[in-house]
Image: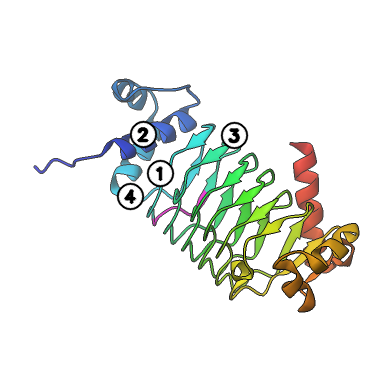
Amino acid sequence: MATRVIDDTKLQNIAVAIQSKDGGGQMTVDEMPTRIEQNLQSKAVLDSLIDGSITSIESDVTRIKAYKFNGCTSLVSVDFPNVTTIGGYAFQGCYSLEEAIFPNVTRIDDAILQRCSKLETAVFDKATYIGLASFQNDTKLKNINIRNIERISASAFWDCSNLNTIVLEKRAVLDTTGAFTGCPAIIYVKPEDLSWYSTATNWSTLYAQDRIKSIEDLTGDDLVWYQEQLARYQAA
């Protein structure tokens, strides 16, 4: 019978999945057999990670390394409520991913969710920075919570062709108008910031295209979504 070789990254992913399912704390690879025996659900998680079919991950880890889940094409949903740091390219190419929840991440590094072509919802409540091409080619992205962003890098929303609404509650530096190439989103800002955006570097071009408006202009589903995000953030 052939032996399957699993690299260290996959073993670490397996350990994270097991501890999140059986409620245990941190675990070494040597502890894995006992924990698997103690929890049949974890065995199922282990098997699904090995064969690549795991679809959902919820975990209390606080840090995700670069490239950690890169190319995990079976993932549909990820929810990391305690993660504060994610390395670049961590979920790049997760083609089946539909929802990504990271309420406490403070920095969205380069290409974190690039080419996640089925991603519809992303939550980054506390993030203040968006790196290069972070959401590039996420053609189904509809809702993204980046209300505290202070800087947006090149190609961040390149070809996000279904993204219609972005809310910024702070004055954000925009490295280039190319951040929104192929993205039709209207950017909603605080009414008192409209004048600043009208002359700010790179933003002034979008302002002239009537793509920057006051948060007070939010209506319908966009307003309901924004109010839900505010309520969730305040309750956290």
Q: Which residue is mark 1?
A: 68
Mark with earlier residue (3, 2): 2
Mark with earlier residue (4, 1): 4
Q: Which mark is residue 82?
A: 3
Mark with earlier residue (4, 2): 2
The x, y position of residue 131, in whole percent, is: 55, 53
Q: Amino acid at mark 1?
A: Lys
Q: Amino acid at mark 2?
A: Gln
Give the residue drawn at x 86%, y 59%.
Answer: 193
Give the residue drawn at x 33%, y 20%.
Answer: 31
Describe residue 206's horizontal placement relative to residue 31 as left or right. Answer: right
* 45 versus 141 height, above or below: above
Mark with earlier residue (3, 1): 1
Mark with earlier residue (4, 3): 4
Q: Which mark is residue 12?
A: 2
Q: CA distance from mark 2 to mark 1?
A: 9 Å
Q: CA distance from mark 4 to mark 1?
A: 14 Å
The x, y position of residue 183, in whole percent, is: 62, 73
Q: Nearer the viewer, residue 41 or 205?
A: 205
Mark with earlier residue (2, 1): 2
Q: Amino acid at mark 4?
A: Gly
Give the residue drawn at x 44%, y 22%.
Answer: 26
Q: Which residues are magenta?
A: 73-77
Q: CA distance from mark 3 to mark 2?
A: 17 Å
Say which of marks 2 and 1 sits in front: 1
Mark 4 element type: loop
Mark 1 element type: loop
Q: CA distance from mark 4 to mark 2?
A: 14 Å
Q: Which mark is residue 52?
A: 4
